[in-house]
Image (spheres, rainbow, N blue to C red):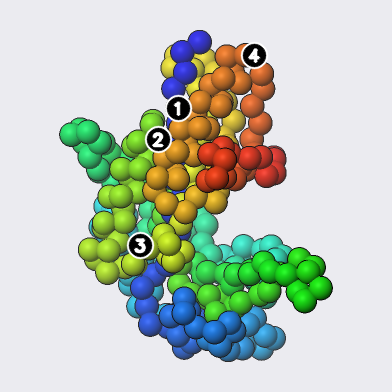
Amino acid sequence: MELETVIGLEVHAQVLTRSKMYCSCSAEYANADPNTHVCPVCLGLPGAMPVMNKAAIESVIKTGLALNCEIPTFSKLDRKNYGYPDLPKGYQISQYDLPLCAHGTLTFDVDGDAVTAGITRVHIEEDTGRLVHAHDEQGNEISLVDLNRSGVPLMEIVGDPDLRTPEQAGAYLTALRQILRSIGASTGNMEDGAFRCDANISVRATDGSWAGPKVEIKNMNSFRSVVRALQFEEKRQAEVVAKGGSLVQETRGWSEAQAVTISQRTKEQ
């Protein structure tokens, strides 16, 4: 059976604004002491009243226009509920079925050829805090919570599964970051966490007779890591199929040191 690879990327980019998404706290958290850029809103305290950041909304719409998206006349916000220490409210204010921007395209160059990939949607959400893993005075492993990043404006750019090679994925990310930087929507710095990518990859028969489950890859901190992780996963999935094995829908993490993906959890839907 001849196989082809199917890749779709989900990019989170911090929106370049002076203040956070729903409060007036500074969004410049990178070099600040822990938990100094916080208030009742981004701490998720009861009774706190959020006020939306107009500049963040405008930057997301500007991004949508740069990606040839449709801008609907109506949009809404949704709650994405999950419990984790860096999310004090217990939910993230995000979007799902009615985003700010939808149905766009991104054209980029791969070895002299123009490739066009679809953009499913561009939507606004808020960033979470972050966990700092350390050891206490007795040597016990502990996790410290820094909520300076909590509430920083974040946009998610969801791409259609139109990419066919890891190299196309790398070129896609390069072109997307260039656009975000040129319009002033984001710094695009992966080393600062301002530009993050999760990759979905599967293999299928070229004649359409069979398609494997989707695998999500996380923990990639550079464009090179994205390409290497996809190259490894493409080869791994093809080898499993060639040996008659079964692939499962799961989330896998990329280990830069070992240059392999590692299963983290299975996904039912």
| Residue 41 image-quadrant placement | bottom right
Residue drawn where x is 39% and y is 30% of the image: 164
Across and down, in percent, residue 173 comes to 35, 49
- Distance from the alpha carbon under mark 3 to that under mark 2: 20 Å
Residue drawn where x is 46% and y is 64% of the image: 193
Label 3 vs 4, first from the N-terminus: 3
- Distance from the alpha carbon under mark 4 to that under mark 1: 18 Å
Across and down, in percent, residue 58 comes to 33, 72
Label 3 vs 2, first from the N-terminus: 2
- Of residues 246 and 126, the one drawn nearer to the viewer in this rendering: 246
The residue under label 3 is 188
Dot 2 alpha-carbon crowd within 10 angstroms: few under 14, some 14 to 19, many 20 or more: many
- Of residues 57 and 227, the one drawn nearer to the viewer in this rendering: 227
Q: Amino acid at mark 1?
A: Thr
Dot 3 alpha-carbon crowd within 10 angstroms: few under 14, some 14 to 19, many 20 or more: many
Residue drawn where x is 76% and y is 66% of the image: 141
- Distance from the alpha carbon under mark 1 to that under mark 3: 27 Å
Q: Amino acid at mark 2?
A: Pro
Question: Do the residues bearing badges 1 and 2 touch, measured as CB atoms within 8 Å?
Answer: yes
Q: Which mark is residue 166?
A: 2
Q: Which mark is residue 244?
A: 4
Label 1 vs 2, first from the N-terminus: 1
Label 4 vs 1, first from the N-terminus: 1
Q: Is residue 106 left or right of residue 252?
A: left
The residue under label 1 is 5
